[in-house]
Image (spheres, coloured by chain):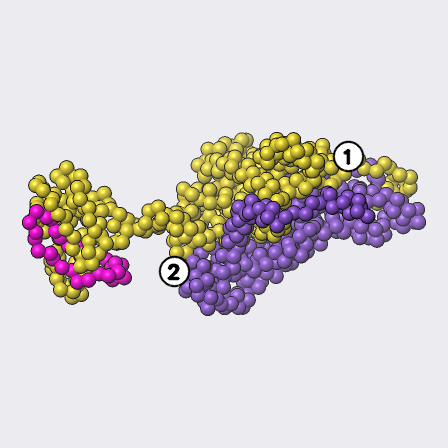
Chain colours: A yellow, B purple
Amino acid sequence: MTAGGIVAEPPIAAAPPPQAGPGRLGRFLTGAIFLTPAAVLLVTWMVYPAIYTIIRSFFGQHGFIGNWVGFDNYKTLFTTATLRTAIKNNAIWVAVVPALVTAIGLIFAVLTERVRWSVAFKTVVFLPMAISAFATGVTWRIMYQQDPQLGAVNALARSVHDVVNPPGVLSQATPAVPQLQTSGGAMVLKTPLHAGSIALLPLTGIAPDQVPAGAKQAVKPPPKQGDIVGTVWRDFKPGGGKPGVVEQGEQGLPGVTVQLRDASGKTVQSTTSASDGTYAFSNVGSGTFNASIGAETFAQPFAGYAWLGPKLINPSLMIAYIWIWAGFSMVVIGAGLAAMPRDVLEAARTDGASEWQVFRRVTVPLLAPVLSVVFVTMIINVLKVFDIVYSLAPQSTQANANVIALAMYYTAFAGGGNFGVGSAIAVFLFLLVVPVLALNIRRFRRDV
Amino acid sequence: MATADVALELPKPRDSVASKVLRWVAKAPLHLFLVVLGLLWLVPTVGLFLTSILPVSALASKGWWQIFSKPSLATFSNYSALFHNAGLTNALKTTAYISVSNTVLVVVIGAMAGYAFAWLDFPGRDWTFIAVIGLLVVPLQMALIPMFRLYDHLGLYDTWIGISLFHVAFGLPFAIFLLRNFFIGLPKDILESARIDGANEIVIFVRLILPLGLPAIASLAIFQFLWTWNDLLVALTFGQNTQPITVWIAGQLREFGTSIDIIAPASFISLIVPLIVFFAFQRYFVQGLLAGSVK
């Protein structure tokens, strides 16, 4: 059995030869009895509608009579922005998804061949195939929620993000006095400083639970010859107080990075505030300086990627779709792999080929027919993709995620009501699917 | 005796413990990789389930994984509330009517036609069969608009029967293709001798073909059942108040954040039945899949 022979079906053309028995009419009647139900259904639900839709696509929105529009509906299809988005998105789907699904399925199939518990793994990966694409959409909406507290994908992204880019200790803080100004994420005290100055850096907007642990009563340090000293503190006390003045009941902010910049803006010294908020730059020398609090202190915590927002919606949909179909690809390719002649692989290994060479030069070429069945099947599936877009893309970004089947539905139904353009979209989809599926059927006939 | 022993042992030299351990260690990264992948693949489904058993108040501020630190939050009140929700119970009933009825019809009608194409001889048989195969390429979008109009005239719009019949028709080409090809492989002499014994075609079909064709019929039935249980588009188009579960949940999706206590458990209920079918008949499911990559 060749790898392509996973489909254990006899050829289409070879039916048993006619046999002796009832006369021509009798045979015809028997056949008719068995075929009538199927024929009625197929003609009424498929043949008649298909012809109707093709004809309907040449007429305008308001029915047949006096409404012949020629190819206008097809022109609309390629000139309306939403429909063009749909075609463009579907093209991206076709370019990306079938290849990825086939590749992932191949990798999974080859890897699972080497472990004893492959059945468990295959079951887990195959599971989403049984679930509706609609329920998958709901499932991934929960995964993709933007708030990292709610959505698992962003929670994972945050744990990576926080290592690379930790959130600042005082991400919510704002300056309490006008001299302290925000610039490029940092806060700079515009008052010029000299050796012996005191630089007060009052901040507000810090919630009590955001005050760094170990904060003590803020202290204004005495001036010191040759040094610049100062305090970073939470310039707020219940019942009011004077902005910019260190008062009883106000807390110092420990652990804040304070930088000293010279006249050209270059950071010359850097230090960290103590538990009472005080800090000091020693031996600053001559010249004027500015004190500033580094941008990292105010770095915003990770807000989460907008997976379902207009920019990321298409990749997000494709990830969920691949999650569904990887199992299909893995199982079909796995069946092809199981049917592959072992001795060929063994011979290659005996000849000293590395595992990678065996995979690249023997396994993949022998699997080519199966791989292309998976690939072509996925192209057809992707062309008709509907449910997952409908359920996973929120209303606000469905226009960005539009695909042909979705556009057809919204154009003809759900308030669209344009059967002319709707029919044209359906015919367009039909024309896209026919050659691909015809290819698949031909392959079936040839392989078997 | 000694020579026999040697001969027996030669093909399988005993592995030393050390070499076993070594091989296991060499494979450890692969095992680890697959375990991580498997877990990743499970996360969405597990997340849906855990979301479905958390109260909506808890879900407003933290995700489903909070249940690991606070297992006491788990509650089945979302589910018990749903089973008193007439919308959901009706949707489940509608889903069951549609998927069971159309599965039975596809199997019966498909088997009859498959038998005719495989074993009956009548003029134009092969051409008709190729025409049926040709119908495999027709996407159901081609039928939505005309059937929407026709259903209006026939009184089939917004009925589960209308939705079910649509699925029957679009399931038939694949059913006929699959069953005809299976039936044609059945041993010819059994049928011949039954005919010689004077059995008519209907008796042969019921007594011989259906039982013998059971493996293919089972694959087909499972596929058709899952296909229609999971359908959204057809029911969305031909139903308004007749809503299977997918359409009913879709109606709740607009208020995703606030009705998550309905959406999550309802979605989980909707996927329990397919999962049971899948686990119970996994073998047939995979067989059908392998034969049906053409659909």
Q: Is residue A145 visible?
A: no
The disc numbered 1 marks a residue on which chain? A
Mark seen at residue B41: none
Residue drawn at the location 54% of the way across and 31% of the way down: A70
Residue drawn at the location 59% of the way across and 55% of the way down: B158
In the rendered structure, which amino acid carries the disc numbered 1? Ala
Residue drawn at the location 70% of the way across and 36% of the way down: A343
Q: Secondary structure at mark 2?
A: loop
The disc numbered 2 marks a residue on which chain? B
Q: Taking B143 as reference, is B180 left or right?
A: right
Q: Tell which of A202 and A31 is nearer to you.
A: A202
Q: Tell which of A98 and B69 is nearer to you.
A: B69
Q: Secondary structure at mark 1?
A: loop
Q: Taking B41 as reference, is A193 left or right?
A: left
Q: Tell which of A171 and A422 is nearer to you.
A: A171
Q: Is residue A151 above or below residue A360?
A: below
Do the CB atoms of the residues marked 2 and 1 lie less than 8 Å apart? Answer: no
Category of crowding for the residue at label 2, using alpha-carbon neighbours closer than 10 angstroms: few (below 14), some (14–19), many (at least 20):
few
Q: What distance separates the C-alpha of mark 2 from that of mark 1?
A: 63 Å
Residue drawn at the location 19% of the way across and 62% of the way down: A216
Q: Residue furthest right?
A: B197
In the rendered structure, which amino acid carries the disc numbered 2? Ser
Category of crowding for the residue at label 1, using alpha-carbon neighbours closer than 10 angstroms: few (below 14), some (14–19), many (at least 20):
few
Q: Which residue is mark 2?
A: B61
Residue segment shown in magenta: A206-233
Q: Would residue B82 be counted in the magenta stretch?
A: no
Q: Which residue is mark 1?
A: A13
The x, y position of residue A447, in whole percent, is 71, 34
